[in-house]
């Protein structure tokens, strides 16, 4: 199967396979991920795929196996938490603070959000953020200051009080 044939086949088969895997796995998002990964594997073997030999069945089987493998890994993680006396749902759930932060980050502009995340969550210095984003250091400092102000308005006045150092490492939420 050449690239053009693969692209045409993918466009026709992917939505159908996602629907089928959603029914099998019970999750649309999980089905999308599994089908996409299966198509990546099919792409790597596209020269060996034969349209007459049902490549769609191969992708469906592969996507199902990927889904089962993910389910097993999740189940194993949950058993490990349980063995240690930890509630697996609570251990895997985001904290209220993190959920509030993510919601607040959605309210600021994309440049400020990226800068805040790189500096405070990825622990990059201002200079490192500048290099990664291609922005001048002064612009990074301004984005941090404006982003913090915007987040403080959303999260409350005490939200960023502990970290006023734009040159140091960040505090994690």
Image (spheres, grey):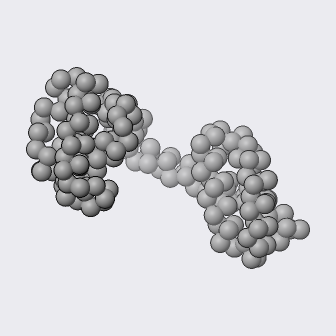
**In the image shown, does 86 or 57 lie closer to the viewer?**
57
Residue 49 visible within the image: no
Residue 44 visible within the image: yes
Where's residue 29, x and y in %? 59, 42
Where's residue 38, x and y in %? 66, 60
Where's residue 23, x and y in %? 72, 40
Q: Would you say 43 lies left or right of 117 here? A: right
Find the residue positioned furthest to the bottom. 47
Give me the residue at 20% from left, 29% from top.
159
In the rendered image, the quadrant that contains the C terminus is top left
Which quadrant of the structure image shows residue 57?
A: bottom right
Which quadrant of the structure image shows residue 120?
A: top left
Where's residue 6, x and y in %? 75, 66
Give me the residue at 64% from left, 46% from top.
31
Q: Would you say 82 lies left or right of 8 here? A: left
Give me the residue at 40% from left, 48% from top.
80
Q: Would you say 105 lies left or right of 128 here? A: right
Find the residue positioned furthest to the right. 52
Q: Relative to 73, is 151 above or below?
A: above
Give me the residue at 38% from left, 42% from top.
110
């Amino acid at each position: 199967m050449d690239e053009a044939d693969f692209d045409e086949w993918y466009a026709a088969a992917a939505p159908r396979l996602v629907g089928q895997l959603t029914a099998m796995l019970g999750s649309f998002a999980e089905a999308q991920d599994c089908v996409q990964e299966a198509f990546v594997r099919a792409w790597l073997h596209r020269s060996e795929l034969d349209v007459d030999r049902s490549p769609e069945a191969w992708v469906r089987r592969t996507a199902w196996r990927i889904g089962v493998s993910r389910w097993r890994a999740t189940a194993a993680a949950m058993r490990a938490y349980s063995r240690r006396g930890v509630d697996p749902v609570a251990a895997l759930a985001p904290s209220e603070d993190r959920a509030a932060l993510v919601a607040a980050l959605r309210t600021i502009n994309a440049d400020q959000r990226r800068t805040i995340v790189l500096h405070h969550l990825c622990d990059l210095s201002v200079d490192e953020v500048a290099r990664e984003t291609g922005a001048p250091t002064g612009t990074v400092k301004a984005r941090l200051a404006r982003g913090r102000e915007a987040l403080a308005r959303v999260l409350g006045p005490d939200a960023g009080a502990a970290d006023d150092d734009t040159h140091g490492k960040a505090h994690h939420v």
